[in-house]
């Protein structure tokens, strides 16, 4: 799509902020009002629109994409989104460990077990750990604890958590970042631990390296989105 506007401004409505193109308040792809809770988020989305060249590239506007997702897709079906996030707790990355080599086993335990310990203490979600990839049934009490924790998230925060969880493969990593227990870089390292070990052991793999770079960028975008909701 060609750029069709010249000016981008932030406007204050009664109880939200929005972005205007050439003085016209924006709507989402679903034709909903682009209602944003914080001025900082509105400023950042406005900057994404200002930085577009002659051709608009949606993939260069991650904050706009996440905000639209929150409004158009997450808010109308919040219960279903909560279910999809909670489901990651049943197959959480952190619960499936390697048998060997010993160095990887140690790394997983050192990086992942403290996150599971935190989840048990802070959320009341004690998840079981197994070796290999065979499905492991998790305690219903723990799954319910995760559900109870995230049910109270609004659509925007739930969108950020969904992104962090889906990219990392771990709702515990997602919650640990959301709740400021770890920073996003630690979350990326935990999520990519196995792949980074493979690169160390087997050498350069351009396809895997690109995949890791993309997932890191996406986690950073999600974290930035969440951070802008708090200021």
Image: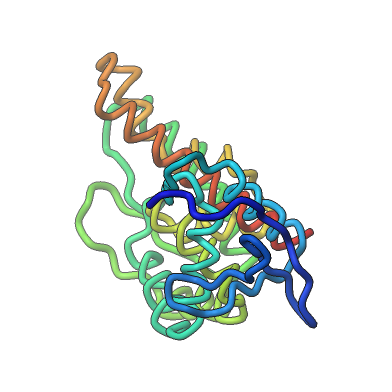
Residue 124 visible, this orientation? no
Left or right: 25, with 191 as reference point: right
Quarter holding residue 108: top left
Q: Residue at x 54, y 47 (%)?
A: 221
How is the protein colored in the picture?
rainbow
Where residue 196 sits in the image (x, y, percent)?
38, 27
Q: Does residue 231 sit above or below 131 in this rendering?
A: below
Height in image: 169 above or below 12?
above
In the displayed structure, 2 sits above or below 87; it is: above
Horizontal side, residue 211 vs residue 16: left or right: left
Name the image quarter holding residue 215: top left
Q: Is residue 8 visible?
A: yes
Image location of residue 116, percent across then percent down = 52, 55
Q: Position of residue 216 (x, y in %)?
A: 46, 38
Q: Is residue 103 left or right of residue 164?
A: left
Seen in the picture, residue 181 relative to 74 is either above or below; the reply is above
The residue depicted at 61 percent of the width and 51 percent of the height is 6
Q: Give how far across and how far down residue 199 sits, in percent.
A: 32, 21
Q: Which residue occupies the foreground of this view, 61 or 227?
A: 61
Q: In the image, 199: left or right of 26?
A: left
Q: Residue at x 59, y 72 (%)?
A: 34
Q: Front-most of 177 and 55?
A: 55
Q: Observer-nearest residue: 34 or 160?
A: 34
The C terminus - image quarter:
bottom right
Q: Residue at x 69, y 58 (%)?
A: 41
């Amino acid at each position: 799509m060609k750029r069709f506007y010249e000016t981008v401004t932030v406007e204050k409505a009664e109880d939200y902020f929005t972005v205007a193109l050439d003085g016209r308040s924006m709507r989402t792809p679903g034709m909903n009002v682009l209602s944003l809770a914080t001025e900082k988020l509105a400023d950042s989305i406005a900057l994404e629109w200002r930085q577009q060249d002659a051709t608009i590239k949606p993939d260069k506007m991650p904050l706009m994409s996440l905000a639209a997702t929150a409004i158009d897709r997450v808010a109308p079906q919040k219960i279903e989104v909560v279910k999809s996030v909670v489901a990651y707790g049943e197959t959480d990355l952190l619960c499936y460990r390697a048998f060997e080599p010993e160095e990887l086993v140690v790394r997983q335990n050192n990086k992942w077990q403290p996150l599971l310990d935190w989840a048990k203490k802070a959320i009341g979600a004690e998840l079981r750990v197994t070796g290999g990839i065979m499905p492991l049934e998790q305690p219903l009490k723990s799954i319910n604890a995760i559900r109870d924790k995230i049910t109270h998230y609004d659509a925007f925060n739930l969108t950020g958590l969904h992104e962090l969880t889906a990219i990392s493969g771990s709702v515990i990593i997602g919650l640990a970042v959301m709740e400021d227990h770890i920073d996003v870089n630690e979350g990326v390292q935990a999520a990519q631990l196995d792949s980074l070990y493979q690169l160390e052991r087997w050498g350069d793999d351009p396809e895997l390296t690109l995949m890791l770079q993309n997932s890191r960028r996406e986690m950073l975008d999600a974290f930035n989105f969440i951070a802008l909701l708090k200021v």
